[in-house]
Image (cartoon, grey):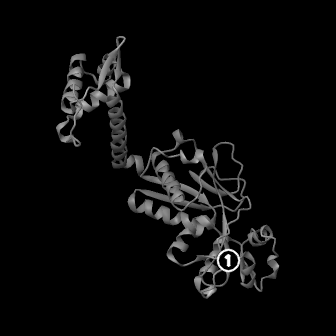
Amino acid sequence: MKPNKSPYLDLRQIPLNALHAFEAAGRHCHMRKAAQEMFVSHSALSRHIKLLESRLNTQLFERKNNKLRLTAPGARLLTSIQNAFSELNKGLHLLDPTMVAGEITIGTTATIMLNWLLPVLAKVQLKYPEISFNLHTLEPHQQSIPSNLDIALCLGKPEDTNRTISKLYDEYYVPVCNPILLKGKNITKPEELLAFPLLHDGLGQWFKWFEHHKLDGHESPQHTHFEYAYQAIEAARLGMGMALADIVEVAKDVEQGKLMQAGASAHTEGQSVYLITHEEPQMNYRTQLVLRSILQNLEQKGAKLEAPVKLIGSKTTP
């Protein structure tokens, strides 16, 4: 059988039953098992396969040593069909309100919540109004995490023996301010920041940042202290001084021009964000869907996600 030389094939000319038959036969590489799975006779299954090969003008199976094997084109087609069926199955799940509708309980720090998580959840809720959220605030470095949380995003590794704890990403701190504060000045050296008012959060990151650059942060002319990072970031938006913020948390502000990075130096002091969830097989569909949206958003913001975390929810791209 000569390969089809046409660059385009019309899917409407290929019966869906023939694709189902081929997928089953290709997965089992055994006609009798595939026929039993589809509740059809061996001859009926063979007719579907021959019809598909005829429409495609391509041999999909061959026999070697009395064993059924996929040809190279057949193997490629099987992968494509299985991917297509998987996508179709996701779409059908999303049409079933019992798969999506319901509440998800999420806990995280106030800074993560306000600076990047809420916009993600707003987009999810706009697309899937059947989902409702129950949101809880966690303190930085909180050790005990409530057991009712479906998803927890924690600053610092907590203690939780009943669920999966995965490191999401390391925070990288950069100096940011309202562009009007610089008055057109281009910051090229860390010591130049000592001429500006500093906005501190409860973790005292500024002094660690200056120590990393072998400078004394106390030389700044003015210091304003807040309990939480989101408060310092909001003060920076208002032009009150320089805040030290995680790149992910201010990515949208920088993109929109509300804040600008003052200098190119980024620094981490070992602060890490951790994810707490149940094992993926134990997660309901809507939780997997929301989690995947969160991970995609973090990647878009430039967060360097840990490899095991990237796999979570990978089968449920919204």
The picture places residue 117, in percent across and down from the top left corner, at 54, 63
Please tell me which residue lies in front, 234 or 8.
8
Check disc 1 and report the residue beneath it.
188
Q: Is residue 129 visible?
A: no
In the image, residue 113 lies at what x, y percent? 58, 65
Toward the viewer: 295 or 181?
181
Against 197, is 125 above or below? above
67 lies above or below 130 = above
On the image, the x and y values in percent for residue 44 come to: 21, 20
Q: Secondary structure at mark 1?
A: loop
In percent of the image, x 63 and y 47: which residue is there?
Answer: 166
Q: Amino acid under label 1?
A: Thr
Identify whether 296 is placed above or below 217.
above
- Horizontally, residue 289 falls left or right of residue 207, namely left
Left of 207 or right of it: where is 112? Answer: left
Q: Which residue is at the front of the view, 39 or 236?
A: 236
Binning the other alpha carbons within 10 Å of mark 1 as few (below 14), some (14 to 19) or many (20 upward) gives few
Camera sees residue 233: yes
Q: Residue at x 46, y 58 (%)?
A: 132
- Position of the N terminus, as image quadrant, is top left
**Which residue is at the far top?**
66
User: Is residue 139 rendered to the left or right of residue 279?
Assistant: right
Figure check: 188 above or below 309? below
Residue at 45% x, 44% y: name it: 315
